[in-house]
C-alpha cells in the first residue's frame, strides 16, 4: 500500500503514533522550495506555519489543511475554499486550559510571581520584608473581558470564584451569558476605563488587528493590567512598550506576541512590569492530547473526501 504524502514532519511522537503507517510525513521547513509540496495531499499545521494562496499554488494535490489549534489566522481560509481545500481546527477542547492560563498570567502579573521568584533565588533575599513586592489584590476587583467566546466565558466563570465584577465587550451582546455568568456588556472605551484587569480572549481578525493601540491604552487606569491570551497582532506592541514605560498602565502579561517569538533585543523583553509566556494557552497534557486527536480525525476525513468533524468555514 502506498503511503499518503502529508506535510507535517515536526509532529510529536504521540501524534505520529496516531497517524500510524498510513502517511508519509514530508518536511515543512523547505516547503516552498521543495518537491515535497508538489506531492503533498494534506497539510498539518502544527505551530502556525503560514498557508496562503502562493503556497497552495505549489501544492496542487492538497485536499485538506488540518490545523492543530482553534485560531486559523495563519491560514488563508478563503484561498483554501477557492481551491476546494477544506480546513479543520480544534474548537472547544482548549477553552478550559486557555482560561486557566489567562488566570495564571493575571495572578502572576498582579502578585509579582515572576519578579518574586527571581528575588527569592537571589542573594538579595536576606530576610522576610513585609514591605517588599506588594501586588494588586485580585479578589473583588473588576475584570474586563474582550471577546466573550468559548474561552472568554470560561474566564468569566473563573472570575466568579475571585468575586470579581465582570465587564465584557465583543462583536455581539450575549444576553444568555449575561444572565448565567452575571457579566455586563459595555462599550470598549468604558471597559478599558473601568477595569483593573483587561483580558484579550478574541480571535485575530481584520476587525481585531491592533484593537489595543495608544488611544486604548490611554483609556486604561494607570493601576490596570493588560493580559493578552489572543494573538500578538491584537495589540500594537510599540504602543504597549510606551504605555508600560511611561506608566500609562501598571503592567502586562502576554502569552502571545507579534512576531512570535519577539527579536531577542525587543524592549518588551527588558521590562520588569511584563510577564511573557511562550504561547502556552492550551499547553496542558489533557488538552494537547485531545487537540492532536482532533487534528488527525480532521485530516483523515478530509483525505477521504468526507465532511470534517471540525471544519472552518470561510468568513462571509
Ligand atoms: C489556538 O488554538 O489557536 C492556540 O493558540 C494554539 O495554536
Image (spheres, rainbow, N blue to C red):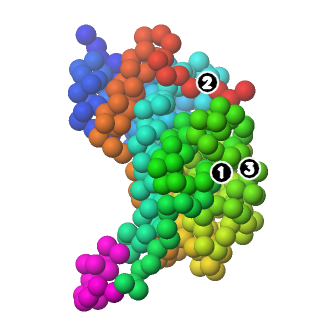
Q: Does the residue labelled 2 lie within 8 Å of ligand 1?
A: no
Q: Determine whether, in the image, residue 227 is placed left or right of residue 21.
A: right
Q: Specify whether residue 89 is in view.
A: yes
Residue nearer the viewer, 205 or 76? 205
Residue shown at 46%/50% (left/top)?
161
Q: Which mark is residue 186?
A: 3
Q: Is residue 243 above or below residue 90?
A: below
> Is 119 inside the magenta-drawn segment?
yes
Tell me the mark number nearer the camera, choosing from 1 and 2: 1
Q: In this view, does 12 lie to the left or right of 194?
A: left
**Residue 2's x, y, as percent?**
28, 14
Cα–Cα gap, marks 2 and 3: 29 Å
> Which region is colored magenta?
116-129
Which residue is rendered at x = 45% and y = 45% of the image? 98
Question: Helix, strand or loop at disc 1?
Answer: strand
Q: Residue at x 25, y 10 (%)?
A: 1
Instruction: Using the numbered discs, state the Cα–Cα distance from disc 1 to disc 3 in whole angstroms.
Output: 7 Å
Are the residues flagged by discs 1 and 3 in contact, CB closer than 8 Å? yes
Amino acid at each position: 500500500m502506498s503511503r499518503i504524502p502529508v506535510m507535517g514532519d515536526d509532529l510529536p511522537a504521540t501524534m505520529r503514533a496516531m497517524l500510524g503507517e498510513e502517511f508519509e510525513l514530508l518536511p515543512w521547513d523547505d516547503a516552498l522550495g521543495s518537491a515535497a509540496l508538489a506531492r503533498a495531499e494534506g497539510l498539518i499545521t502544527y505551530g502556525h506555519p503560514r498557508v496562503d494562496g502562493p503556497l497552495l499554488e505549489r501544492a496542487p494535490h492538497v485536499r485538506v489543511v488540518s490545523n492543530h489549534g482553534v485560531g486559523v489566522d495563519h491560514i488563508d481560509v478563503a484561498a483554501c475554499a477557492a481551491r476546494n481545500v477544506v480546513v479543520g481546527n480544534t474548537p472547544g477542547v482548549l477553552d478550559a486550559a486557555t482560561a486557566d492560563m489567562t488566570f495564571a498570567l493575571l495572578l502572576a502579573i498582579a502578585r509579582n510571581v515572576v519578579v518574586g521568584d527571581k528575588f527569592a533565588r537571589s542573594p538579595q533575599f536576606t530576610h522576610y520584608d513585609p514591605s517588599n513586592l506588594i501586588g494588586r489584590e485580585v479578589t473583588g476587583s473588576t475584570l474586563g473581558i474582550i471577546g466573550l467566546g468559548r474561552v472568554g466565558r470560561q474566564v468569566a466563570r473563573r472570575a466568579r470564584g475571585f468575586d470579581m465584577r465582570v465587564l465584557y465587550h465583543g462583536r455581539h451582546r450575549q444576553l444568555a451569558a449575561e444572565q448565567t455568568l452575571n457579566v455586563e456588556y459595555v462599550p470598549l472605551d468604558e471597559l478599558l476605563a473601568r477595569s483593573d484587569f483587561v483580558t484579550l480572549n478574541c480571535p485575530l481578525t481584520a476587525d481585531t488587528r491592533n484593537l489595543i493601540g495608544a488611544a486604548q491604552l490611554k483609556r486604561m487606569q494607570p493601576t490596570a493590567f493588560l493580559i493578552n491570551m489572543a494573538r500578538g497582532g491584537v495589540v500594537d506592541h510599540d504602543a504597549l512598550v510606551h504605555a508600560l514605560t511611561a506608566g500609562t498602565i501598571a503592567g502586562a502579561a502576554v502569552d502571545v506576541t507579534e512576531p512570535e517569538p519577539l527579536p531577542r533585543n525587543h524592549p518588551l523583553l527588558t521590562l520588569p512590569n511584563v510577564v511573557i509566556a511562550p504561547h502556552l494557552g492550551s499547553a496542558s497534557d489533557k488538552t494537547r492530547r485531545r487537540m492532536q486527536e482532533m487534528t488527525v480525525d480532521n485530516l483523515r476525513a478530509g483525505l477521504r473526501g468526507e465532511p470534517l468533524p471540525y471544519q472552518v468555514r470561510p468568513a462571509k
